[in-house]
Image: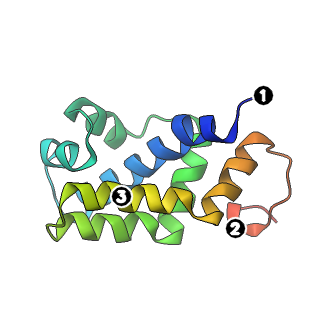
Amino acid sequence: MELDCENVGKIVLPAMRRAVAKELTDRYNMKQDAIAALLDVKQASVSNYNRRFSSPRVAMVEKFLERSGVASRIAKMAASGVPKQRILAAMEGAIAEPLMMEIALELRDPNRRSGAKFGRK
């Protein structure tokens, strides 16, 4: 069984980066190299994010991040010129929120009934 922190590293953080990169590309027309510098990843990673190849688990978390507005808020910070360290800190802070911990628990046990916030009824 994976630990919750492993889910954060393998699923939640990549989903956060993908969602923010997509916002920066689509809404703010930022170039991949600029996005890569802000998110502290390689340009090739941003290219992969934009092609939308992901595991179902990453896609589930990414959709949640988009619906909740977390990705939009962080992308807006990035587009407005906030320093990279503050953007990365905002991403870490968002991951540490209790709702994100619920996502980690959901990833551990997909049959867990945590509510409609994850797209289930």
- For marks 3 and 2, give the one nearer the viewer: 3
Q: CA distance from mark 3 to mark 1?
A: 28 Å
> What's the image's color scheme?
rainbow
Q: Earlier in the sequence, mark 2 or mark 1?
A: 1
Residue 89 has which mark? 3
Q: Looking at the picture, how far across and down is residue 73, in whole percent?
A: 36, 71
How many residues crowd mark 1 within 10 Å: few (<14), some (14–19), many (20+)? Answer: few
Q: The N terminus is located in which quarter? A: top right
- For marks 3 and 1, give the one nearer the viewer: 3
How many residues crowd mark 3 within 10 Å: few (<14), some (14–19), many (20+)? Answer: few
Q: Nearer the viewer, residue 82 or 109?
A: 82
Instruction: Give me the residue at 25% from left, 41% from top.
Output: 40
Instruction: Give me the residue at 27% from left, 37% from top.
Output: 41
Q: Mark 2 = which residue?
A: 117
- In this view, 12 is above or below 85: above
What amino acid does circle 2 point to? Lys
Residue 1 has which mark? 1
How many residues crowd mark 2 within 10 Å: few (<14), some (14–19), many (20+)? Answer: few
